[in-house]
Amino acid sequence: MSKKLRRSTVPFLAAAAIFAFLLLAAQVTPSAARSSGHAKEYSRTPIMLKVDLTEAARHIFHAEETIPVKPGPLTLLYPKWIPGEHGPTGPITNLAGLVVKAKGKRLVWHRDPVDMFTFHVEVPRGASKLDVRLDYLSPNSRGAFTAGPSSDADLALLSWNTVLLYPAGYPSDGITFQAGLTLPDGWRWGTALPVASTKGNEIDFKPSSLTTLVDSPVLSAEHFRIVPLSAAGETPHEEIDLAGDSDASIAMPAASVTAYEHLVKEARTLFGSYHYRAYHFLFTVSDHSAHFGLEHHESSDDRVPADTLTDPAARRAAAGLLPHEFVHSWNGKYRRPAGLATSNYEEPMIGDLLWVYEGLTEYLGDVLTARSGLWSPEQYRENLASVAAGLEGKYRPGRDWRPLADTARAAQILYGAPRAWSSWRRGVDYYDEGELLWLDVDTTIRKLTDDHKSIDDFCQLFHGGPSGEPVLKPYTFAQLVAALNRIAPYDWRGFFEKRVYDIAPQPPLGGIDRGGWKLSFSADPNKQITDREASRHYLDLRFSLGITVSTEGDDSGILADVIPDLPAAIAGLAPGMKITAINGHSFTADTLRGAISDAQGGDQPIKLLVEQDGLYHSYDLDYHGGERYPHLVRRSGTPDWLGQIIKPHAPGDMAKK
């Protein structure tokens, strides 16, 4: 972004700041901030919603709604822009069997010719309610976030936005839902949504706003376990609700339980408050669901492969997931960029500040992963080294044309971008680069204040406030800068303009250097990369040949990505090609690594036989530098601020160290 364009945004930011100040003069609940008088009919009279998951094994969720109405034209909406997914990702394709009735008679509905998420119906004279029936066809393969697989024979994750329509013209906080759920016999469940009553396999929930309903998924399964993370009777209560493919898959090791208990203490210490009535980690451990994490205010939807708890490498590779999503309760839910604090699910979101929403969360989440003991200090440093190296200009050439700010603004299209040529395109870099950026902020604060203040002080100022029920407090870039200046006066606007909005050929490594360490490369494997390779079935040779290669099943040997101007790209290789032989031997990870070792220091190329679209070609890779992996090494004569940052901070945890 040019300086001229940046200057042109100043009046807009000033106006936004004034609006935000008026809106945020006091902490308010989302409904108080966004509801208006015309929504009273739906806040007083709830929409009844009944969902039946007894056919979850067939990937069919049944839903019935009773919607209070008045005669005349009515527009119904299927949730489109899903919070936390930062895009128009509502799985409208999987809505089926839509039937609308009034006074027992079926009505004709029409999908809007432009917006596929919108339905129009004429309510007949004398009708006071509509009866709506629909099915959600839960995918059994592919799909991202809540549009991905969410059920199998033994478990189901219900995201309420997938099974409902709501009337247009009202903020989501101004619509009340009375929800009920029927589960397969014998299944147990967990959710942050307050429960009114249960009877057998039927659950009735207390009335809640549409906002709270969509923000409160339900995890249910035959193989289910509750892991309390706070003492009995303690307020608030935190727990992990575990569901898996078998009882063995959810047998969380005792050391992990202890670490997650520390996570809760460390997070409360970091922020100095909490903004939930109770918190539920909805932890799905299965090979039959999509794998991701999605934040909610009082829970998180965390899904990992079936061996994550039982395989040490997989467990270490996924250790940062729950801490990241937990941080979002403060940073993303309680404090949210104004552009993402929309009033309903049809209003487009503006992701410009995702480098705060996700980037700061990535930084704090990994710090808490180390503080809680889910990672050792060495594992934290190895992860940070892999992040920093992967963003260097040599390995991320897209930095030469795309600023970090654009990866945030374009989030809605980048989440679904292919892996091919990702280093040249760039992806949702505001996660990893956000981690480096906020480490840079943290160590800058420490330097400016002679190590008397840190990012922890900013978190307590910006994300703290009174503890209690969920509230929403949107913010602007100007307010973020003002809060940082209260902690440590500095040109924070200029700091972020240089690192976020300008083209930056290199990532912000100042936090690593200032923290007492430096990035280095050697032939020694990076332990975090090794864990990810083992658990995610790929080979990471970005820092030598400039490729990543699948090692899984029939896809083994397929190039997932090729980095421009590095040896593989120079030889003519491209993503999607499949390596079938190396120096005359069949492809395996060990064969390829052996070939790199054999070529080191010599003059003979690495010869590859590659298949593409049924044709075979030979390629010579002129590379003789051996395997290279990133690490952090200490800078002598400097304080180890990085070590200070990740040491336990909670009083009880510090006493045990």
Image (spheres, rainbow, N blue to C red):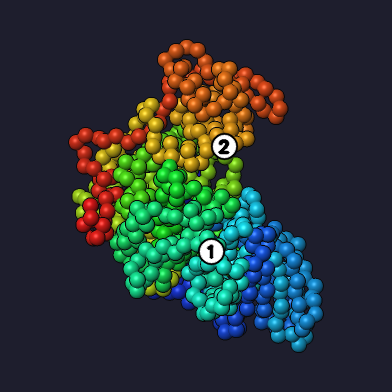
Instruction: Indicate left or right for 328 with 126 as reference.
Output: left
Alpha carbon of mark 1 to alpha carbon of mark 2: how far?
A: 29 Å
Q: Sort mark 2 into few (<14), some (14-19) or many (20+) by Cα contacts within 10 Å.
A: few
Spot occupied by residue 47 in the image (x, y as percentages of width and height): 62, 78
Nearer the observer, 451 or 164: 164
Spot occupied by residue 254 in the image (x, y as percentages of width and height): 36, 55
Q: Is residue 362 visible?
A: no
Residue kind at label 2, given as amino acid type: Glu
Disc tally is: 2
Q: Which residue does the numbered mark 2 point to in the structure image?
A: 552
Spot occupied by residue 5 in the image (x, y as percentages of width and height): 50, 49
* Mark 1 residue element: strand
Residue 82 occupies which quadrant of the picture? bottom right
Q: What residue appears at the point 48 percent right and 37 percent down from the top-left corner?
A: 533
**In this view, which residue lies farthest toward the top?**
603
Nearer the observer, 92 or 402: 92
Q: What residue appears at the point 57 percent right and 84 percent down from the top-left corner?
A: 44
Spot occupied by residue 134 in the image (x, y as percentages of width and height): 71, 68
Nearer the observer, 318 or 231: 231
| Image vertical order of residue 271 relative to residue 68, above or below | above
* Mark 2 residue element: loop
Q: What residue appears at the point 51 percent right and 41 percent down from the top-left corner?
A: 536
Instruction: Indicate left or right for 324 with 561 as reference.
Output: left
Residue contact between numbered discs 1 and 2, judged by CB atoms under 8 Å: no
**In this view, which residue lies farthest toward the bottom?**
126
Q: Is residue 225 visible?
A: yes
Disc with the residue nearer the chain's start (1 vs 2)? 1
| Image vertical order of residue 427 relative to residue 522, above or below | below
* Dot label at residue 219: 1
Residue kind at label 1, given as amino acid type: Leu
